[in-house]
Image: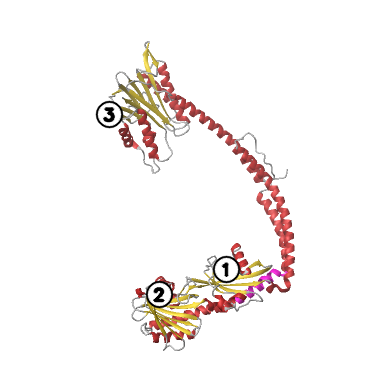
Amino acid sequence: MRSPMTIRRSLLVSVLTLNLVSLGLLLALMFFGSRYVVSYLATSIIDKTQANIQLQVQTLFTDVTNELDRIATWVDQGLVDLDQPDELNRLLKASFKQQDQIAAIVIANQAGREHMLLKNQSSWQMRRTQGDVADHLFIIWRWDKNPRSPEIKNEVLEYDPRKRPWFEGALQVRQSLDQPHEPITNNQLVHWTNPYRFFTTQLPGVTASITTKNPDGQMYVIAIDLTLKDISRYTTKMVVGTRGMVMVLTGVDENFQSDLSVIGLPHAKKFLNVQDQDQYLLKRPEELDLTVLNDAIQTMKEHPAQPGKSIRFYSSGEYWWGTGQLSPLGEQLHVATAILIPESDIMGEIQWVQKVVWAILVLIFVVSVYHVTRLARQFSQPIECLVQDMKRVSRGVLDEPCRVKSDVREFRSLAGAHENMRQSLQSLMKLERDMQLARQIQQKTFPSVLPKVNGFEIDAWSQPADETGGDTYDIIGLKVQDDQLVICEDQPEKILFLLADATGHGIGPALSVTQLRAMLRMTVWSNVLDINTIQHINDQMIRDLPEGRFVTAWLGSLDTITNQLMSFCAGQAPLLHYHAQTDSYDVLDADTPPLGVMAPLPIENRNVFSLEKGDLFIVFSDGIYEAMQLGGEMFGMERVQQVIREHHHQGATAISLAIKSAVAEFAQGCKTKDDQTAVIIKRL
């Protein structure tokens, strides 16, 4: 058998061999430089076109920004007075002459007063607020060449300049830049809106706005409207190569992933008529119904390229190249220019090189598929075998060893780990069965039937924290027959009680308390039950328990004739004696240390309690008092006493159920950390 080889080495040898062959072929093709030439030519043509269109678009926006700066200077110098419309129109018309792409100029103050001058081909329109802004009353002048004979009318418009996007945006820019010790230039204060339809003309466009103050400190907002037709006037005339196109987009972020809309239409027959352009502006690029544009967008979605980088895509039976360049106008408006050009305009006579490249790549692909198929077979067979072995283990079939065979070292290690896991699972399942058996044995030690006696009701239960618990209890009915103690369940003369709690929980503590219960039963059967019994049990516990382990225990003997309860407590505290007549408690401490700690036990006297009608004598293991919430708070003595006081008029079984319910509700699903055991005696 060959020496085992690592997966990494096997893959590296195979992949490197394939890559070296591919590299040699690609280096031969590089000699002709077909791909380099195509990419270089495409990038060169696109970059030149990109620079040209960006210069024109940027100049368009820069001219508007400069005009805003000039009007803002007039306001700063006190030359703008909203109460002098003729003088204000004279100033604003100079701006229209400087920049013929301006559609409208608006000047408004924070009180809501507004003056708007709009140019529509050869006619003019002026709109001014009249009276209180809240009345929405405006005066509108319309004239052709002679402003002295205008058409004047009053109109009520649902319009407030202070609520327009250009007004609010300009104020927000000033607030964000208004630092007390840092000078602000007018260019920093310019705000560009997203494209929208103007309130007056409903034409699509964008608005640039700026805030300034007059010498009296009053805030003004100046806005200039720029229609999108002015941008399309440039882009529809631009042709790249023979069929390439240019368009301008907005609503785009740095990754070209936002909700795009067209503000500069590309060169196409249906966009050449200026009158038809309005219906296509502000639409998504997909809605222009251009196949090449839709294919470019789909390619960008599937294979996003970096902004400014060219992409190659297939459309209408040929390949195209495209790119986009982002030009932010402040933080509000991001404008991008996109260029598409067919590869046939770039490649010319070198298309045959591309065919050769494809033929060689197909050959490489076939060889790669063949080689990868062999590799897949080599690695898939042991994995499939291992999967089948895992399925068999999941069904609990643990007798069959792992069947994986391979020359690869990692597969051998994996098969060995699987075999170790199978053997470990066998051991764990055996341990689980042993634990279940131990639980059944322990549950059998608990009395299945409690003694019944007139005048008393008794209830007891134990709930382990694990499969087996460190708590136990026993209740034995006794009567004298022929001078001998015999066990009976019906109307006994005496009832012997035991509740024991070993340190910890699990198999070990369960054995300890079961041993204690067995020794007590043996003394009963042997008729040698007296005070020395406790000493003998303690001595045996000291011999049997490992260091640091002990058992707390409570032993009680109830005389059903005299209604007296004799009690002995070895570390099992507290004990509760509830007096029904006075609604009070006696909380009793332990009489001696736990069993298995010291010998002899200091047993000085026997505690005898007289149980009156309605009285309760209750012994709980510490798992009930120390039941915890998720926050760490314990159930505690006070809650135990409160539950007993609320239910003392009920029987022992009902009180027992109330305690269980209260502890479970208090813990709120928190896992029990200690065993819980209870013995409840009630005189009826």
- Magenta span of residues: 31-49
Q: Which residue is mark 3?
A: 580
Marked residue nearer the N-terminal end (1 or 2): 2
Which one is in front in this view, the residue at disc 1 or the one at disc 2? 2
Q: Position of residue 499 (x, y in %)?
A: 38, 27
Q: Residue 157's mark?
A: 2
Q: Which residue is mark 1?
A: 287
Q: Secondary structure at mark 1?
A: helix
Q: Residue at x 39, y 39 (%)?
A: 665
Marked residue nearer the N-terminal end (1 or 3): 1
Q: How many marks?
A: 3
Q: Residue at x 74, y 66 (%)?
A: 355
Amino acid type of the residue that numbered disc 1 sits on in the rendered structure: Glu
Residue 146 to residue 571: above or below: below
Q: Position of residue 596 (x, y in %)?
A: 40, 27
The local crowd at label 3, few if under 14, some if 14 to 19, many if 20 or more residues have their Cα within 10 Å, is: some
Amino acid type of the residue that numbered disc 2 sits on in the rendered structure: Leu
Between 244 and 255, which is closer to the camera in this rendering?
244
Q: Residue at x 54, y 65 (%)?
A: 257
